Image: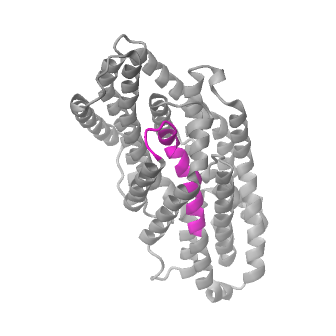
Amino acid sequence: MDPALLVQHGSTLLTIALVIGFLMAFGIGANDVANTMATSVGTNAITVKKALVIAAIFEFAGAYLAGGEVTNTIKDNIIDTGAYKGMEIKLALGMISALFASGAWLIIASVFGWPVSTTHTIIGSLIGFALVTTDASAVHWSVIAGIFGSWIVTPAISGLIAYLLFVAIQRTIFIRFHPFAKAKSMAPYFIALTFFILSIVTMQNGLKHVGIIISNAESLVLSLVIALISAVAGAVYLRYKKFPSKKERKTRYENVERVFTILLIITACAMAFAHGSNDVANAVGPLAAVAEIVRSGEDGALESAWLLSLGAVGIVIGLATLGYQVMKTIGTNITHLTPSRGFAAQLATATTVVIASGTGLPISTTQTMVGAVMGVGLARGISAINLSVVRKILVSWVVTLPAGAVFAILFYFIMAQIFC
């Protein structure tokens, strides 16, 4: 393929990539970010409007402050880009096709309320265009095998952790004679655990994007310090926080849930930041790859900050317009959630992310959250789970990889007809 084609169509391809990159970010907001906010909205801890504000602030902050080096993306782990030496325009068209396929599938899934994996969607798309432009040897199939395993392992781990967390909450708080007083006394410990887990997530997965490498020992010590400070701050806040003072048993339990509402909001903010620092960068990764290919090493291409900003803005708009469908599926349709149950699911998700990052297990935040919500539901018995909704979710997970591949192949052939 003539390299002159890349020079001739470079600006046009970059413009198309920008538009489609925004589409991809929109799809991530509608699906991936929506599932992160689902438990908070589904438990009425926050309104949809407040979820949008949290996402706008913390997703953008995570992407902009800790999501740099977007060219170091998933593309290098799934396909061998070296196979495209001398065929750079094929790689550029393929990356654009992968972006389009991923964005299209995420939007379709969001319309139907299916919580699917952004990572797995882009992986399926990359595999699709690689198979029709080179051959199967260009695909790193060992990574794909790990993904298939994660469909079972990830939800199982998060579900088990959520189950154990909620059972612990029930036994230490809800069945006690003075549940509200017990909740206030236990809350600082839960706050400490929350900040400890989320601090490790951010330090191990987020700060590396800005070149800050923290050893496991250092992240452990810093996380413990942050956890201690947050526990003290939480204890002081709860001491002076005013709650309804009626003595009825119902009011006491309502106050317990109000305590967990505070914890749930804290977790939602931190998870949004962690998500922004990781997945937003991956969302614009193929876009950055196209920019890198087009400029061929020359200066003056789009800066990473602009790419991250584009991704963050697209995510917020996607959450605002279509996110309610996925939030409804996870937050209300799988099982009935309260703030205490939602907190257990949210913390279990964060904990699973830490475990996965330490073991190298390929992970999907969406699947982790769904598994955690199911685990909380199982703590009340299998009848508490809407199995028909779960079946639909499982089918959407299996369909995601081939759907991404098919969309990518179709769009690649269209693009190839136009530019080649």
Identify whether 234 is placed above or below 121: above
Examine the rendered structure and indicate whether residue 227 appears above or below residue 56: above
Q: Where the N terminus falls, by quadrant? A: bottom right
Q: Is residue 29 rendered magenta in the image?
A: yes
Q: Position of residue 413 (x, y in %)?
A: 78, 72
| Quarter assignment of residue 255 | top left
Q: Left of 97 or right of it: where is 328?
A: left
- The total number of labels drawn is 0
Along the line of sight, the residue nearer the viewer: 265 or 105 = 265
Examine the image and state in which quarter residue 263 appears: top left
- For the C terminus, the image quarter is bottom right
Q: Measured from the top left, where is residue 308 in percent x and y? A: 46, 65
Above or below, comparing residue 314 to residue 2 in the picture: above
| x and y percentages locating residue 147 in the rendered image | 65, 45
Q: Residue at x 34, y 48 (%)?
A: 214
Residue 301 seen: yes
Q: In the rendering, at what x and y percent does residue 227 appear?
A: 30, 35
Taking the spot 57% from the left edge, 41% from the top edge, the residue there is: 361
User: Residue at 62% across / 41% down in the picture?
Assistant: 329
Q: Is residue 60 magenta?
A: no
The secondary structure that most of the magenta stretch takes on is helix
- Where residue 286 sits, quadrant-wise, is bottom right
Q: Nearer the viewer, residue 331 or 235?
A: 331
In this rendered view, identify the residue nearer to me: 27 or 350. 27
Residue 305 vs residue 325: left or right? left
For the question of whether residue 362 can be seen, the reply is no
Which range is magenta?
A: 21-47
52 to 181, vertically: above or below: below
Q: How is the image coloured?
A: one colour
